[in-house]
Image (cartoon, rainbow, N blue to C red):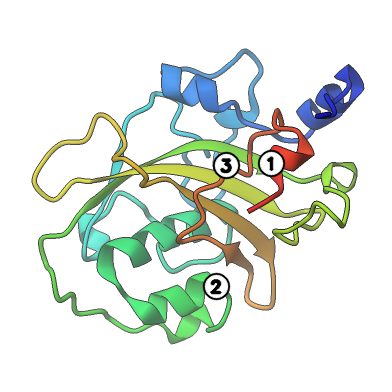
Amino acid sequence: MMKIPSSATFLASAAVVLLCAGAARAGGAAPGDASAAPDKISGRPMVDVNGRFRIIGQTDAQSESTCIGRVDTPLCVAETIVAVEARHDWKLQDIAYGKADPKTRKPFTASDTMMKIAYRIVSVRRFAPYDVPAERFNVFGIKAGDVAIYIETCNATYKRCTQPSLNSNISVLARKGKYGWYAVSGLGRPQDLTNPLYNSSQYWHK
């Protein structure tokens, strides 16, 4: 029999810094929602509450993100992951995953100069100590202080995106490390780790 989480469990989950995915999709934030808090590097809200897509191209000048390749905040890491997907820049990927010092980043020459990816940050969740799943369910190795960011993407090379592409979502799990924030998981991880409403058998299993 499936165990239904108690109301106390839901209240505890809601107490973490959780930015409502539904609010982002609907084009607005819930009253008092922390999604209005700006990222300290880019100066913009962590969640794209108006639902519009931003663009990342083959150069930083062609991109709306102001912190690709930086590791100062979880948002910068998430946008760097999207840039890796758009550019296939493997040195940038090493920076995103904490394997290389961001100071070693060099100019990148793209093989596909036209490729653009549209993206929007749907939801963000910071894991408090009491919010980390039990060890037997913690298949993603989540730790207290980790930040999960759920992103919808769309190929914007030849069109303006208004909806995400099928099976194109990215879930980034960011953690503080040697150089700053880095992605524990990112590309190829479609599960929405920001969602507190799944029970453990649905949420934490691959």
Q: Amino acid at mark 2?
A: Tyr
- In the rendered image of this protein, does residue 124 appear above or below residue 75? above
Mark 3 and mark 2: span between their CA atoms?
19 Å
| Residue on which the image places disc 3 | 192
Quick check: can you spot residue 67? no
Q: Residue at x 48, y 79 (%)?
A: 94
Q: Quadrant of the C terminus?
A: bottom right
For the residue labelled by badge 3, is the local secondary structure a helix, a strand or a loop? loop
Residue 184 in the image: state x and y as whole percent. Answer: 62, 66
Circle nearer the N terminus (1, 2): 2
Residues packed near mark 1 inside 10 Å, few (<14), some (14 to 19) or many (20 plus): some
Residue 5 in the image: state x and y as whole percent. Answer: 84, 26
Q: Residue furthest top?
A: 31
For the residue labelled by badge 1, is the local secondary structure a helix, a strand or a loop? helix
| Residue on which the image places disc 1 | 203
Circle nearer the N terminus (3, 2): 2
Q: Is residue 166 left or right of residue 101?
A: left
Q: Amino acid at mark 3?
A: Asp
Quarter residue 160 falls in = top left
Q: Residue at x 54, y 28 (%)?
A: 21
Q: Nearer the viewer, mark 1 or mark 2?
A: 1
Q: Are marks 1 and 2 in contact (CB under 8 Å)?
A: no
The label on residue 97 is 2
Q: Are marks 3 and 2 in contact (CB under 8 Å)?
A: no
- In the rendered image of this protein, does residue 142 appear above or below residue 166? below
